[in-house]
Amino acid sequence: MSNLVTTSRNGSLTNKNKMSNSPIFSSLDDWFFKDFPSFSPSNFSKGALLPQVNIRETPDAYFLDMAIPGMQKSDFTIDLDNDVLSISAETKQENEHVEETYTRKEFGYSSFKRTFTLPDTVESDKIKATYKEGILGIEIPKREEAKQKPPRTIKIS
């Protein structure tokens, strides 16, 4: 029963094993996960493997902003199929360190896919995407008839 795992109020895992309080084991975790921050146990429980999206609407368009630092434009694939917008990315990384007595080879792989169903009031052929300073921005313009018209007063005849 000493290996029970419980969750704290914030949803992170807590190991009730007495050895988890040892500075040796905590420093090993820090050493092992320092090069893989997105795979560390604390980030895994927070959903760090899936980028968060901010969606905002203006009178003329919808805007999707995703914070995805450290990638290149060529890593992304953005598809539109039957009013479903799909955003995905995939990266691979390999590092090899050779010494006289050992070889250390590390590799990393990450990917994600987010999909959004678009309303039929958008101009799907005019969607634009940009990637600047770690932010993927997608502009989805509205059709003219879907844009909010300014209020007006109607005179009675």
Image (tube, grey):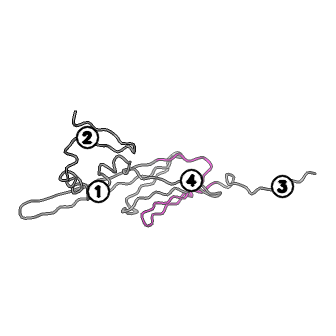
Q: Earlier in the sequence, mark 1 or mark 2?
A: 2
Residue at image point 49% right, 58% down: 65
Query: Can you tell which mark lies on residue 124?
Result: 4
Q: Is residue 91 magenta?
A: no
Where residue 84 appears, as percent x and y from the top left, is 51, 46
Q: Residue furthest left?
A: 101
| Distance from Cα at disc 3 to Cα at disc 1 | 59 Å
Q: Are the residues at dot 3 and dot 1 in contact (C-beta closer than 8 Å)? A: no
Identify residue for label 1. Answer: 92
Q: Is residue 128 magenta?
A: yes
Identify residue for label 2. Answer: 16
Identify residue for label 3. Answer: 153
> Which amino acid type is marked by label 4?
Ser
Where residue 64 appears, as percent x and y from the top left, is 52, 55
What is the magenta range? 115-142
Where residue 143 appears, as percent x and y from the top left, is 64, 54
Q: Is residue 8 left or right of residue 53?
A: left
